[in-house]
Amino acid sequence: MKRVIPALGLLLILAAPVFAQQDEEGCKDHPMFSRMPNFYLSGCEDQEFSTFEFEKPDGYEKVEGHYWKMDYWVKEGAQKSGPLQIGRNYWNPIAAKGATKIYEVMDAGGGTLVAKMPGPKGAGAVWLQVSVTNSGEAYTLYIVQETAMRQDVEFTAKELADALAKTGSVTLNNILFDTGKATIKPESEAPLKTVIELLKGDPSLKLEIQGHTDNVGGKDANMKLSKDRADSVKAYLVKGGVDAARLTTAGLGDTQPIADNKTEEGRTQNRRVVLVKKS
């Protein structure tokens, strides 16, 4: 009996999708990708920031950003679609929108299709993996839209002071600007207020504010943009009550990357503001 019980439990788990005909509570299709006819959502995930390894001919590529997973099962008694039919139904519409096919291995039993397409309105690229199983009875969509993680935990003024005392500089990746501009985004106000608190707590502290960009765009344009952004940060700090004489600025463009500019993750890390302690 001890050997039979686990087997029965496994059968019940595997059979569960057959009897369920309604979408799992709280699940809905991705806004960019509808479902195949006669399928329902048996499960889903939606994480604001996560990672997934997409299949490639030579291995896998890890992509970070907004992550979705949708599990679809064919309804009981309904006509199922073949694996290749499912894969091509997702590929054809995005191919017309400039997508690139990364990987495709499909046969009558199942398979995988991976594609990458430009994001809407200049947003991060969208990766899609269609994984088909059970000869087309079930398939899963894995979707990641490349984006930087929102930094919810901020430096305190003391932590900034400790970092500057220890290394002489501190990198702030949570100072965000409008794309291609030096306009500071509202979500950057909290970390900037911490910098103001730091400077007011130590009247002798002087800082150089360095702006850095990724390598998208021309060298001269990036140099100017990085300087303009550093100047915007200085202006914000001065408006907050810091003596302008304690602050200098420098724009270094894309000359000092700290990550690979070939990936969105790397470019995000390279777009940064650095505070350097000056004597």
Image (spheres, rainbow, N blue to C red):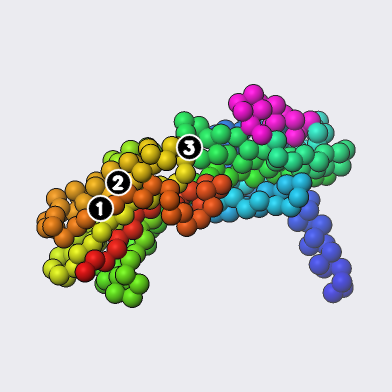
Please name the amino acid that badge 3 sits on. Answer: Ala
Q: Position of residue 157 (x, y in %)?
A: 25, 68
Mark closer to the chain start, 1 or 3: 3
Q: Position of residue 118 (x, y in %)?
A: 56, 34
Q: Nearer the viewer, residue 43 or 55?
A: 55
Residue at image point 43% right, 37% down: 218
Please name the amino acid that badge 2 sits on. Answer: Lys
Q: Nearer the viewer, residue 132 or 164?
A: 164
**Residue 139: quadrant of the picture:** top right
Which residue position holds label 3?
123
Magenta stretch: dominant secondary structure: helix
Which residue position holds label 2?
227
The magenta span reads 85-100
Q: Position of residue 52 (x, y in %)?
A: 62, 52
**Residue 162: quadrant of the picture:** bottom left
Which residue position holds label 1?
249
Disc 2, disc 1: CB below 8 Å? yes
Mark closer to the chain start, 2 or 1: 2
- How many marks the image carries: the answer is 3
